[in-house]
Image (spheres, grey):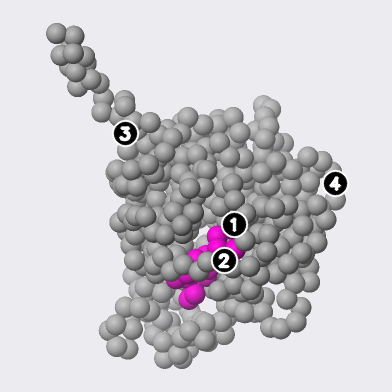
């Protein structure tokens, strides 16, 4: 009789009790305001969550237990999604227009970067109750989590960079310097040492030392592309998954069809790689010498792979129409690539660089695996 | 405008212009492009902005990707869209 009792107990348990989330992920369906829940091991879509509003330019982060996703929508919506029940656990429309967010290192606070009205709002990760409201003089960009219950961000309109400390009873927000004209995005190095702010209104990238925030910021790459006219930028590059590899930063040139390689220690340019178009994402394939690059419209049907040792393009792939994002399996075996206009996510084996599967999705953009829960600066 | 091209332009407005102006065109890094927001903008001027961009801002010139007729079609589309 024991096997029978056991099976009855299993039937009585909620269906999601047996789901582990470590190899799950979510794909943003930008036009329909929905998410596809994916199982990385099975290379399959296992559910869809709807009702998230305007998800153009949406991004997300995960709770430390990899159960909840916090989705930041363009329309100012902040939605907490439960991966186990495949439902919306909480949702607030917290601003008119927002661009991204991050979760604190302890998983207790979620911060959102807003365009309209410009500023940063901080919420309790459990309830989405407002914890702090920090108005800014313009659109906030490049928000990242910094260890010690802190967040850093920049302001597009003023070029100012801020460090906010939320570890005490009251937030302490400090302006730590000016990056330059029109910072478009920023990224934190994996050791949380350097906050790199990319500039659109002038040439250059400005580095802030977050281990010693009193240190004066250092501007570099101020003279790339001096010869020749810059080309139109039809899509702003993203820096969130900026590649750090082989002791170098791999950076998108703004207005040039190039990747710029910068020595991480000296902040001097070491090489330039001509590529297919205006780079949008340059992402390091984990545990490898390679970076993968996608491009701005109208040259966005191609993905290139570049070797960080030789700085040469070693592969040019055509996964589909309008490639918007790439997400690697945490240890690099596969890369999942969203093709917006082919309505699919294409899966490549990174060793053979051959396609090994695909999943249907409606106008997919960002792909986010739950392993992001454990990465600083995402 | 041939129907196929009109569909492609509409797709371009929502998806590619939408990268900066929002999928619902309510704004983002770029200004709102809703019918209300453009109520006092004349279509020819709007078409010129699309073709030549706005120097010193993130608005790029689209002239190499669009004809003048297509830019004007987009301007009228934006001004009439719900």
Query: What's the residue at 14%, 8% (across, down)?
Result: A1
Residue B67 at least partly seen: yes
Q: What is the distance, in whole Å, between disc 4 and disc 3 at their CAs?
A: 47 Å
Identify the residue under disc 2: A314
Give yes or no for contact between labels 4 and 3 (Cβ–Cβ under 8 Å). no
Identify the residue under disc 4: A215
Residue A216 position in % (x across, y down): 85, 50
Q: What is the distance, in whole Å, between disc 1 and disc 4 at their CAs?
A: 32 Å
Residue B55 position in % (x across, y down): 65, 79
Identify the residue under disc 1: A290
Q: Quadrant of the C terminus of chain A?
A: top right
Residue A56 at least partly seen: no
Give yes or no for contact between labels 2 and 1 (Cβ–Cβ under 8 Å). yes
Q: Secondary structure at mark 1?
A: strand
Identify the residue under disc 3: A85
Q: Secondary structure at mark 3?
A: loop
Q: Secondary structure at mark 4?
A: loop
């Amino acid at each position: 009789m024991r096997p029978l009792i056991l099976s009855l107990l299993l039937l009585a348990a909620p269906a999601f009790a047996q789901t582990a989330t470590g190899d799950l992920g979510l794909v943003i369906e930008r036009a329909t305001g929905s998410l596809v829940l994916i199982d990385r091991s099975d290379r399959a879509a296992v559910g869809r969550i709807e009702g998230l509003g305007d998800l153009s330019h949406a991004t997300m982060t995960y709770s430390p237990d990899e159960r909840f996703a916090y989705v930041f929508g363009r329309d100012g919506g902040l939605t907490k999604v439960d991966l186990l029940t495949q439902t919306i656990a909480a949702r607030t429309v917290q601003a008119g227009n927002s661009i991204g967010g991050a979760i604190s290192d302890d998983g207790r606070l979620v911060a959102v970067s807003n365009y309209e009205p410009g500023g940063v709002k901080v919420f309790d990760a459990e309830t989405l109750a407002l914890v702090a409201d920090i108005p800014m003089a313009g659109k906030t960009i490049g928000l990242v989590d910094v260890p010690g219950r802190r967040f850093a961000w920049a302001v597009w309109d003023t070029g100012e960079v801020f460090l906010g400390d939320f570890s005490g009873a009251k937030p302490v927000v400090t302006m730590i310097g000016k990056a330059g004209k029109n910072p478009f995005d920023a990224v934190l190095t994996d050791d949380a040492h350097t906050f790199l702010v990319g500039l659109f209104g002038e040439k250059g990238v400005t580095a802030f030392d977050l281990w010693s925030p009193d240190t004066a910021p250092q501007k570099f790459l101020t003279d790339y592309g001096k010869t020749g006219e810059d080309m139109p930028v039809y899509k702003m590059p993203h820096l969130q998954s900026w590649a750090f590899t082989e002791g170098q930063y791999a950076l998108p040139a703004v207005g040039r069809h190039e990747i710029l390689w910068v020595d991480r220690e000296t902040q001097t340019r070491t090489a330039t790689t001509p590529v297919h178009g205006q780079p949008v994402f340059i992402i390091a394939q984990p545990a490898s010498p390679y970076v993968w690059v996608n491009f701005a419209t109208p040259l966005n049907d191609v993905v290139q792979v570049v070797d960080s040792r030789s700085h040469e393009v070693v592969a040019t792939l055509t996964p589909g129409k309008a490639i918007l994002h790439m997400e690697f399996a945490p240890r690099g075996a596969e890369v999942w690539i969203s093709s917006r206009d082919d309505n699919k996510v294409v899966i490549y084996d990174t060793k053979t660089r051959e396609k090994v599967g695909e999943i249907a999705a409606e106008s997919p953009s960002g792909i986010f695996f739950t392993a992001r829960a454990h990465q600083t600066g995402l | 405008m041939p129907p196929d091209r009109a569909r492609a332009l509409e797709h371009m407005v929502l998806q590619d212009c939408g990268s900066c102006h929002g999928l619902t065109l309510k704004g983002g890094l770029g200004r709102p492009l809703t019918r209300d927001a453009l109520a006092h903008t004349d279509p020819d001027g709007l078409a010129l902005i699309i073709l030549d961009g706005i120097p010193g801002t993130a608005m790029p010139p689209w002239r190499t990707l669009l004809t003048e007729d297509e830019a004007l079609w987009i301007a009228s589309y934006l001004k009439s869209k719900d």
